[in-house]
Image (cartoon, coloured by chain):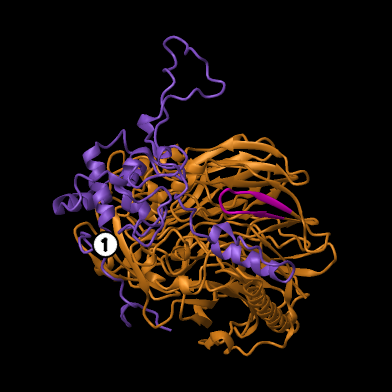
Chain colours: A purple, B orange
Amino acid sequence: MYSDCRLFLIALAGLIPLAASGCSASDPPPSDAGAPPAAAATAAETPAVQLPGTPTQPLAGTVPPVMAPVGPIPGPQVEGEDPATTMQNPYANDPSALEQGRQLFVAMNCAGCHGGHAGGGMGPDLRPDHIFRYGNLPANLFDSISMGRAMGMPSWGTKLPPDVIWKLVAYIQSLGTQEEPDKAAPAPAHAPDSIASPSY
Amino acid sequence: MTANDGRQRSTRWALTAATLAALALAGSAAFAQSSVSSPPPPTAEGAPTPQQLNPLPAAADIHTVAPLADGQWTVPAGDVANTRFSPLKQINATNVSSLKVVSTMADGIAHGWEGQPLVVGDTMYVVTPYPDKLIAIDLKAPQGPVKWIYNPRPDPRSQGVACCDVVNRGAVYADGKIIYNLLDVETVAVDAKTGKQVWRTRLGSIRNGTTMTMAPLVVGDKVLVGNSGNELGTRGWITALNVSDGSIAWRAYSTGSDKDCLIGPGFKPFYVKDRGKDLGIETWPPGQWKIGGGAVWGWISYDPETKLIFYGDGNPGTWDPTQRPGANKWSNTLFARNPETGQAVWAFQEDAHDAWDYDTTIENILVDMPWHGQMRKLLIHPGRMGFVQVFDRTDGQLLSAEKYVPVNWARSYSLQTGLPDEDPAYRPHLGATTSNICPSSTGGKDWNPTAFDPQTGLLYIQAHNVCMTDTPHKANYIAGTPYLGADVTMFPGPGGWEGALIAWDVADARPVWTLKETKLPLFGGVLATGGNLVFYGTLDGWFRAVDARTGKILWQFKTSSGIVGEPMTFVGPDGKQYIAVYSGVGGWLPAAALPSVSETDPTAALGTVGAVPDIKKYTSAGGVLYVFGL
């Protein structure tokens, strides 16, 4: 976004004076200083909202009563409000769980898609240099494995128990760290000469 | 901010803009220079110089069985015999140095753009990688504006089932329709004039790991298509659909009973090794044939004289051979079939009980030429296993098999038995790591097709020199997920080169010259023309024309991405010859160029990353169609 915006400005520079406000995409996020503290109410405390077009009485036995909004609502957020940011992997830092997670990664055919050591292929790279479209917090990874994703990631939540999924999450979190089990051996620079013919 | 600050900033931006404009001008000047100057010095830009190895073959009376028609390109390989040779010669060795870009079009897709455009009448048709759009381009108007776009909207989940990038190798034209396959296992026919869908037939399901990527071939009133998915436990097949309405005429499986494989009384394999009843079941552990691979994802050839189609099918699943004792028929097998009924006429299994993923789906080139003094109907198979094989296509007799890249899994093929003489030191099995196998699973070359020039008698092979370490492991079949069973790491082969355009003398079974690449393998197709020219592209984006006899580079142009597409040529409505090619890196061997693949895991993308660890330095994904003219 930043570079797009900058090119746009370069193109405009010779035609019109630079707007004082600059480009919003490259600016720091707006300050929360002016927001009233009351706006940071948690979802649980928010009263149920009557959405436009919603019947006042649900049809008997078919539709649950209108619920309070679930999850964060628009507006200034406070750190830690998203439960995913605080949810811990019960197997984090457990060396035997990492080993099991590695074995599961191969046995459940994750390696076939995401690469022998998770560098990608059919499915995306899961190593730390990659941007995780659906987030790389433990809870995000658990959800991606459990629910599946739109580009072809199968949903494993009905096939694997939660503790198995958490072990897979533990393995993925260990990638690129000292704790990563069964690291990939580096490829040789090239095959030795004279192991195959013809040579030309 | 003061007014003074504002002026300073404006000045700075204006200067930057001026600098950019100057750079742009310099860029276009360089572009013009590279397009119209005399032949560039071959050493410029690190371009290779040809290595002469053997003299040219003696002039011979060579017949192509189905020459190209009137400057069009209506079937994937130009002709049904898969020569990728066009007799057009307006663009030739004397004027190719002034070849320049006449039009470009981006596809907006960061995946491998394999395949080639079609040209029918005054329209060019291109098929994109997933989402498999068909775009019609008006060749009558300047720069070729889009006439219409057909968007089939295949199931997005098919992207997660495609083994080797979400590619498509192109369409075929017949009966006023453009016909091609969709990744989510459908074949569609689109009205070539209006872009309206005529029919759409579902042929399988992504739920069991099946996809479709190959380019169909039309023979008579039938269109022939095949599936992909050997790395996901699919069961291979070739299927004929009626061109008129898309209904299925016949299907021949690659595994299972003789009935399922359309093997009947007319089946006469040349060699004993390929004879027996229900070998598609008997050469497998019980039930394993149902998930045994053999997908037909490559090119199909047709000979109008013998009225036979020829194709090879793919590897057996899993890659762990220990899980499937037996010959695993009919995986990795060349078939000759009757296109009307699908009945098999002969078969030749390349490697029984494959342990290397050496698919036999590579193209088969059909020519009639003198062979040891006698005119023969030949089938030339430059195989993934590293040998150029020559068969008599009337009966499946192997006439020659010689290595064209460094090979060690086998020493030779016996012409008496049709069996390879394997070196057991390079056969992987469960519980061991086998090192330095050559070539790697990607082969001496993969699906990227060669061209055969009947004027020179040379086959132009885009080879790569890659070897591998293979550690098989037990694979679990979980429908719709990879049924892989091996940890593979690939790396450049011996001799200090990664790829080469090899001019191969078919009659004498030896190379005449090579043009080697030291940084990256080659992974696109080749075009030979009547202008004494051979066109090919490199993975760092160079598109080149070389002298068909000497290999001297006569012209080159740097495209925007690595080339995995196949060059083609045609005569436009203005009567002038043009050359077209897709630039857009991706697919299997170059997968590490894709943003979704890390160069830090050599086993990623089924082991190919180790072979091209620094490819991101040289190229990145994003498809562009280039059209060149004089």
Q: Position of residue A100 (x, y in %)?
A: 19, 49
Question: Which one is in front, B201 or B349?
Answer: B201
Q: Quadrant of residue B277?
A: top left
Residue at the right extreme of this rendering:
B574
Up-down relation of residue B302 to residue B458 (above or below): above
Is B227 positioned to the left or the right of B366 in the image? left
Give the residues in magenta: B125-136
**Disc 1 marks which residue?**
B428
Nearest the viewer among B497 and A151 is A151
- Mark 1 crowd level (few <14, some 14–19, many ≥20, 10 Å Cα): many
B128 drawn magenta:
yes
Please state the horizontal and vertical placement of residue A144, each as a whole percent of the image.
Answer: 36, 43
Asked if B117 appears above or below B14 in the picture, the reply is: above
> Residue B281, can we see it?
no
Kind of residue sitting beneath label 1: Pro
Is B92 covered by the magenta stretch? no
Query: In this rendering, does residue B488 appear at all?
Result: yes
Quadrant, the C terminus of chain B:
bottom right
Residue B531 is left or right of residue B271, and the answer is right
